[in-house]
Image: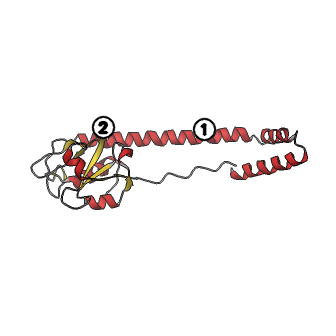
Amino acid sequence: MSRWLSLIFVLAAASAQASPSSAEDDVGRFMAEKRLVDRLEEARQVMGERVTERASQVAHRASELVVTAMGFLGVPYRRGGNSVDGGGFDCSGFVKAIYEQTVGLVLPRRANEQAAATLAIERRELQPGDLVFFNTLRRTFSHVGIYIGDNKFIHAPKPGAQVRVEDMDVSYWASRFDGARRVVTRQEPAAPRTP
């Protein structure tokens, strides 16, 4: 597409030097003959549809993750646990299980490894399904949960507790917040080139 734009500018410049009054007419005729305006509009529509489709897929995936995670409310915490059948979850086992069951993506087992394997984002960019990390054991990324929206996250908190929803603005969590990460499931294919 940039090749066509370059050609348009060269022709426009040449026409402008030859006859200033007819330069706009020449460019207009050239664009009409080559259907450039139509092609640009078609490319814009295709890109708009792809963006809309991708946004819809992301929203669907996020809602599936949150709904699946909420289905485990009340499951007991179990150190090293990663399934209901195994007696419960620890924080990273919970996140790993939810992503594997919902998206089919196998995340690393430990919270710090999950942080390393995901894309860092700003807190203001959080969307449902993103991961939130906390320093609960005097080391970074020692605890993880799944963001569900409205400054809340779901996680397997500690021995003797159950999977539950927490508010990130509560002082305990706010003071231990380590960062947010986004799980990137695949690269988007490149958009086709328009001549």
Q: State whether residue 113 is above or below residue 48.
A: below
Secondary structure at badge 1 equals helix
Q: Is residue 18 visible?
A: yes
Residue ID at (47%, 54%): 187
**Mark 2 to mark 1 CA distance (whole Å):** 33 Å
Classify 10 Å Cα crowding around label 2: few (below 14), some (14-19), many (20 and above): few
* Residue 109, horizontal then vertical, whole percent: 26, 60
Classify 10 Å Cα crowding around label 1: few (below 14), some (14-19), many (20 and above): few
* Residue 106, horizontal then vertical, whole percent: 32, 56
Describe residue 173's horizontal placement relative to residue 185 as left or right. Answer: left
Residue ID at (43%, 42%): 57
Three-letter residue code for mark 2:
Asp
Q: State whether residue 140 is above or below residue 48.
A: below
Secondary structure at badge 2 equals loop
Q: Which mark is residue 150?
A: 2
In terms of image quadrants, where is residue 26?
top right
Describe residue 187's horizontal placement relative to residue 35 as left or right. Answer: left
Residue named by callout 1 = 45
Q: Residue furthest left?
A: 160
